[in-house]
Amino acid sequence: MKPIYKYIGIIRIYLVDLLGGIAISKALSELSKQQYFSKETLHNIQEEKFQRLFNIAKSTTVFYKNANTYSELAILTKDMVRAQFDNFISNTYKRKLYTKATGGSTGKSLVYYSTALSRSYLWAGIILSWIVAGYEKGDKIAIIAGSALIDVKSSFKRKIFYKFLNVDTYSAYKLDELNMTLYIDKIVNSKVKIIYGYATVLDRLATFINTKHPATFPALKGIVSTAEILTEQMRQNIQAAFKVDVYNQYGCNEAGVSAFECEYHQMHLINTRSYFEVDMEGSLISTDLSNEGFIMIKYLTGDKVEMSEEVNCKCGRHYPIIKKVIGRINDFIIDLNKNIVHGSFFHFLFRNDNSIKQFQVQFDHNAINIFLNVNLSIHDKAYYNRYLDEVKKNFKFNEYNLYINSSFLTSSNAKHRHIINTSEPVL
């Protein structure tokens, strides 16, 4: 039975590749071998890929036509990409470009183009993290996330993509007790082998299991957390609820960054997909080596990391090790009916509106206030009322307010927070 099951799993990924015009199987096979290459070999592969990309960028893009060396290039920000969007497109790239958007952790997402090869490496990196947790091709997967991983209005083709991959998707937008009960029961009954989701979502689900809805998951092999900071308290809480090990996974797709925890819980960064550096302040700067259609070199990811000085890991992998990903845990919005909605709801709501430069949502026990920093030369104030209407459909508050180009609240360290519970102190 085992060989047949494995064969079916291989066919599933082959169908995913066929449907999506991508090559996950090939990328996964490549990364599975490379992860055990020597440090020197990995570095040589990285350098060779970067030099190829740099030469393509110089000869085929407007933005890099006068570039001479990597070191002389300015660090690339989201605002720079928005301002000169077309100048990053390779004029010789003839294959399909896929429109993608970042999660918008600072309140405004970046729309960019990806390629089939980059998408293949993205999924191969994710699957590597699943494999550490016990995944075998064909296993049932549960993805619990927001728009960064799943699209609630996804196309038929995307739904078929997940069907072939044997993935069930669960929205992180509304985590009330009814939905969490339904999620838990379906995960148990469908014999999910791997759960993959946002750290805060997994933590909340675990707390519900530990305190109100005990459940057992006999088919579950492991859990992989992504997209947000996984604290040690979260990890212990999730493991206590599901009775399996929890592994962390980190990525920044527009920069080609993909990292995963090994069996010894060391975070390995796949350096044959990205050309990266960490500046004196700990900011991660990276280049996606697999995106030859929309080239962004020396891109500021917005994340801070601390790299480990360790060069060897007991697992045998020789990818560089991230000691710590430094960031902020996304907040939830809790309305008067105690409905709990993940903050990514607003990233999804605003992500395709280029007139919105940044947003902030402030709420308390009575009211929800939406602050938008917008370009009024593109739209007038009345245009943005439609977003307030969407908020009213999804949240129960006594007051709903929309503020255009008003001041945001800032934290003590001056960092922008896009979701703030004003009934609690701002840290």
Image (spheres, grey):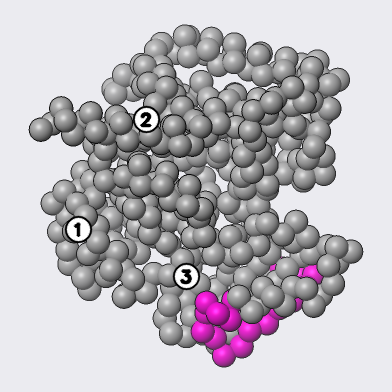
In the rendered image, the vertical position of residue 24 relative to residue 328, given as above or below:
above
Nearer-N-terminus badge (2/1): 2
The quarter of the rendered structure image containing the N terminus is top left
Identity of the amino acid at label 1?
A: Val
Q: Locate residue 264 relative to residue 26 in the image: left or right.
A: left
2 and 1 marks in contact (CB < 8 Å): no
The furthest residue to the bottom:
398
Nearer-N-terminus badge (2/3): 2
Q: Position of residue 276 (x, y in %)?
A: 59, 27
Q: 316 or 103: which is nearer to us?
A: 103
Q: Locate residue 248 relative to residue 252 in the image: left or right.
A: left
Nearer to us: label 3 or label 1: 1
- Identified at 68% across, 69% down, the residue is 409
- Identified at 74% across, 35% down, the residue is 76
Give the magenta-colored segment's residue range: 391-408
Q: Locate residue 61 relative to residue 53 in the image: left or right.
A: right
The quarter of the rendered structure image containing the C terminus is bottom right
The residue carrying mark 1 is 188
Q: Locate residue 242 relative to residue 296 in the image: left or right.
A: left
Q: 13 or 282: which is nearer to us?
A: 13
Element under label 3? strand
In the rendered image, the vertical position of residue 38 relative to residue 391, given as above or below:
above
Nearer-N-terminus badge (3/1): 1
Magenta residue check for 393:
yes
The residue carrying mark 2 is 14
Q: 268 or 125: which is nearer to us?
A: 125
In the rendered image, the vertical position of residue 221 relative to residue 295, given as above or below:
below
Specify whether residue 14 is in view.
yes
Give the CA separation, mark 2 to mark 1: 27 Å
Q: Which mark is residue 341?
A: 3
Element under label 1? helix
- Identified at 65% across, 57% down, the residue is 351
